[in-house]
Amino acid sequence: MAIHKILSTNHKNSYSSEGFVGFIHFSFKFIFSKDLIQLALPDKDSVFKTHKFSYKFSDVTNFKEVDEEVIQISKTAGGTIGGAVIGTLVAGPFGALVGGMAGGNKKKDKKKSSTFAIEFNNDEWVTFKIKNNVSGKLEMSSLKNSFPQFFEEKELEENPFKADE
C-alpha cells in the first residue's frame, strides 16, 4: 500500500525538520508478513537518517477521520457551448439560449482527501492524509476491513414516526 506523509505526531522520538514530520505505511497480512503500521521519523542529528517504528494493528486504540478536504468543480464553458449547440439543433435560436443556460454553471463537490488520526496503546498518535483517488479508496477499504470497530456504521435509533405494522 501507499506511504503517507505524517502531518503531526506526539511520538516521543519525533523531530520535525522544516515541516517534515515523517511517513506512515500500512503493511497488510500476506503469506509470511504480518499486519503492521510502520512509522519513519527523521533523526534530529542527520537529515538523511530516519528511525523506524512498527506497531501491530492490535496496538491501535483509536482510528478516525478528523477532517476532509472537499473541492468544488465548476463546469461552465464546455457545458455551455455543448448545450447551446444541442439547443440550436432542437429548437433553433431560442433553443440555443435555453441550452446554453442549462449546460453551464454546473457545480459538483468532490472529496479530495481525508485526514485521519491513529492512537496507539502507548498514548502516542499520528495524523496523516489519504487522497480520494483509486489507490486511496482501495487502501481505505482495507483499513475499514482491518479496523471494523472504528468504522462501524452507527445504527439509527428506532424511528418514532414509523407506523405500527
Image (cartoon, rainbow, N blue to C red):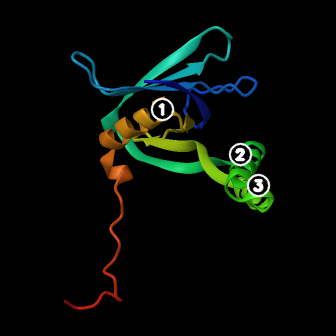
Judging by the rendered image, the residue that carries numbered circle 2 is 82
Q: Is residue 79 above or below residue 52?
A: below
- Residue 110 horizontal side relative to residue 87, left or right: left
Amino acid type indicated by mark 3:
Gly
Which residue is rendered at x = 31% and y = 39% of the image?
146
Q: Which mark is residue 74?
A: none
Q: Which mark is residue 134?
A: 1
Q: Earlier in the sequence, mark 3 or mark 2?
A: 2
Front residue of 145/34: it is: 145
CA separation, marks 1 and 3? Answer: 33 Å
Q: Is residue 123 above or below residue 56?
A: below
| Residue 80 seen in render | yes
Which residue is rendered at x = 36% and y = 64% of the image?
154
- Residue 138 horizontal side relative to residue 113, left or right: left
Front residue of 82/127: it is: 82
- Residue 67 horizontal side relative to residue 63, left or right: right
Label 2 packing within 10 angstroms: few (<14), some (14-19), many (20+): some
CA separation, marks 2 and 1? Answer: 29 Å
Label 3 packing within 10 angstroms: few (<14), some (14-19), many (20+): many
Residue 57, position as x, y percentages in the image = 33, 34
Judging by the rendered image, the residue that carries numbered circle 3 is 100
Residue 97, position as x, y percentages in the image = 80, 59
| Residue 75 seen in render | no
User: At numbered mark 1, what does the secondary structure look like: helix, strand or loop?
Assistant: helix
Residue 17, position as x, y percentages in the image = 72, 23
Which residue is rendered at x = 75% and y = 61% of the image?
98
Amino acid type indicated by mark 2:
Gly
Residue 5, position as x, y percentages in the image = 59, 28
Residue at the left extreme, as displayed: 165
